[in-house]
Amino acid sequence: MIKVIKKGKYYFFFKSNKFIKTNGNNKIKVADDKAAKQLSKYMSACFKSKNKEKSFFLRVLFFSFDLDKSSKSDIIDKILFFLSTDLLCYRAVKNSELESFQKKLWDPLISFVEEKYKLTFNITNGVIPVKHKATNKVRLGKILKKLNKQELTSYYYITNISNSNIIALNFLANNINFKHAWKCLSLEEDYNLKKWGQDKEAKEKLLEKKSYFNEIINLYLLFKKSEK
């Protein structure tokens, strides 16, 4: 069982009467009472579970608390790399059924980041790399530097699982929720399963991917609530 004890302005977590710490020897802590209770309950479930998705949540949680100035800079560089390969910029064959679905679902997300963050993206049909304005990296870099540890961690893992800064930006700006974000990032895989028949292995991989994505969102929302 995990105990929660307030020391100063933070709530700390104990397991077997010892501080819960990361691999980097950083203590897990939150400033909000409600968030502390929720995190304690969720961590208890994760420690007890043999489910690999729950272990993934703990790994992401510890990762966020181990971020320092140097590692944050490295993470931002990795995130910026995704700008040139953003999922939403690469479409199916022109005038195909899948392209029409992509246009309907993805174009509003691109329009949102273009208007809100002044980022511009070029769209292509196929997989040949497209170039975007150099100012995109500068502007996104400034946005990322303003994020706290948990926000940056969530953003990093969202881009890893979706290969899309556009989806991550929309989610963190509350323009889309978990369900909408998942629909966007899994569009092609879901389309292929429905179009060509249910492949058991492909379906299982997609469900597993969704479970991991859900854990990333759980972390983000838990700490977002603690800021209110």
Image (tube, rainbow, N blue to C red):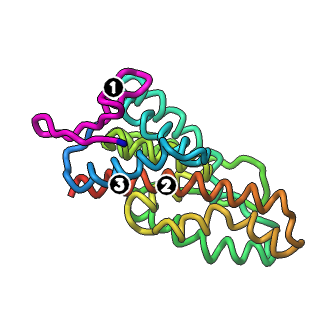
Quarter occupied by the C terminus: bottom left
Using the image, tell me which numbered label, if any, was put on residue 26: 1
Q: Amino acid at mark 1?
A: Asn
**Callout 1: 10 Å neighbours few (<14), some, many (20+)?**
some
Q: Residue at x 46, y 68 (%)?
A: 177
**Callout 3: 10 Å neighbours few (<14), some, many (20+)?**
some
Using the image, tell me which numbered label, if any, was put on residue 69: none
- Residue 130, position in %: x, y? 68, 49
Q: Which residue is mark 2?
A: 168
Q: Amino acid at mark 2?
A: Ala
Could you tell me how far apart the alpha carbons at marks 1 and 2 are, in whole angstroms?
27 Å
Magenta residue span: 2-28
Q: Is disc 1 placed on a helix, strand or loop? A: loop
**Viewer can see residue 133:** no
Is 180 on the left-hand or right-hand side of 150?
Answer: right
Q: Earlier in the sequence, mark 1 or mark 2?
A: 1
Of the pair 121 and 81, the residue shown nearer to us: 81
Using the image, tell me which numbered label, if any, was put on residue 222: 3
Q: Earlier in the sequence, mark 2 or mark 3?
A: 2
Q: Is disc 2 placed on a helix, strand or loop? A: helix
Of the pair 160 and 76, the residue shown nearer to us: 160
Asked whether 187 falls inside the magenta stretch, the response is no
Q: Amino acid at mark 3?
A: Leu
Image position of 36 with respect to 10: above or below? below
| Contact check, label 1 and label 2, Cβ < 8 Å | no
Nearest to viewer (mark 1 / mark 2) = 1
Locate residue 6: give its quadrant: top left
